[in-house]
Amino acid sequence: MTVTAGRACATTGYLALCYHYLRPPKAQDRFPRLLGLSLDQLSDHLALFQRRYELLSPEEAWAIAYGSRGVEPHRYGVLLTFDDGLAEHVDAARMLSARGIRAFFFIPTCILRDRLPANPIIVHYGIAAYGLERFLQHYRAALEEEGLSPGDYDIPFRRGRDDPWMAIAAFKRTLTYRLPPHQTRRVLLHIYRRSLLHDHPDILTQMHLDRRQVEDILQLGHAIGVHSHSHVSIAGANLDEAEFLEEVVEPKRYLERTLEVPVNALSYPFGDPQDCLTWETLLRRTREYELAFTVQEVVNTKTSSPLELGRFAPTSSDTAETIHAKLTQMIQEHERR
Ligand SMILES: [Zn+2]
């Protein structure tokens, strides 16, 4: 953990973490098939971070990139981020705030502007509500009714014979990278309106934050950033100029206009290399952002590009111990470079 004596301060940095679903105990969960950490697990993680690392606020992460703030020579920093604008993030925001921790919350603006869910959230809740086989039947019907050929985009799956995780991966690839983004959106909204919303009229409040909750998060001292409009792969979906404006540029202006706060950070949906622009390409297409986060597992330093910052995304099985092991491994790899 500690940097060996004599190393320059510039070699340390901070680790950013990217959280998604935080679910209630299974017995109380209306959608128990959804995978996620519990709030108790998050609480354990926070205790670990406060014991072992220096918690950074969004402003401090910005100041490391652009200001005079350095990084501690003997201690790594941790910055917390929450993606997807999920309803339970308001509870996480309160828990963090009670411990004096401030974080970034990245919002897909469709949840506020259109009062519609983000693409992957429709998929996760759809599979949780109906099981994979029935969900894929809804998907086939949606393709047909939207005038698309099921044969071109079908995901074959027979329960008990095919591997469900392979089918889910194929489904995500098809919707994220093969179907044009406006068609993906139409198909998923079709499933949302005809099935999920029909069967669970209050489902949007189960899924996502509303404007009042985002305002509460801001009041608690946290920062918000953009997670595109509908959760597209910004680099992988071949966005034309109008789509880029709608998905990347306008969401920042919308959040600033409606919530009256400055917004300078972007979290790339999906966040893998094929989903993220290089800092040069992002700057060529827009100068709206000063920080951009991927899910590349690297330590961020004062010399990292602030438009290609790394994060580690814990999974539902990660305990404080496994996270500590992972962060230690990232630090060791960083120090070997
Ligand atoms: Zn996301």
Image: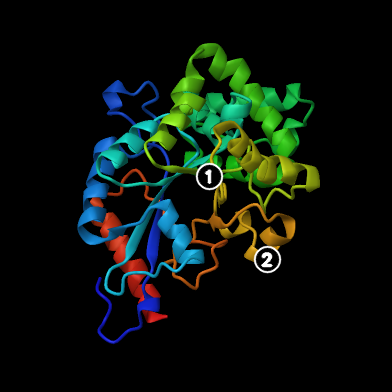
Query: Is there any visible trace of residue 95 in the rendered image?
Result: yes
Report the residue marked by disc 2: 280
Q: Secondary structure at mark 1?
A: strand
- The amino acid type found where label 1 is placed reads Gly
**Is 20 situated left or right of 111 in this image?**
left
Whole-percent x, y for residue 275 in the image: 61, 54
**Is 182 situated left or right of 165 in this image?**
right
- The image's mark for residue 303 is none
- The amino acid type found where label 2 is placed reads Glu
Whole-percent x, y for residue 131 in the image: 48, 26
Report the residue marked by disc 1: 225
Q: Residue at x 48, y 28 (%)?
A: 208
Rendered-image quadrant of the C terminus = bottom left
Whole-percent x, y for residue 170 in the image: 59, 44
Residue 113, by quadrant, is top right
The local crowd at label 2, few if under 14, some if 14 to 19, many if 20 or more residues have their Cα within 10 Å, is: few
Whole-percent x, y for residue 236 in the image: 67, 52
> In whole angstroms, how far apart are the C-alphas of marks 2 and 1?
20 Å
Query: Is there any visible trace of residue 174 in the rendered image?
Result: no
Number of marks in picture? 2
Against 123, residue 130 (above or below) is above
Q: Secondary structure at mark 2?
A: helix
**Is 232 situated left or right of 306 in this image?**
right
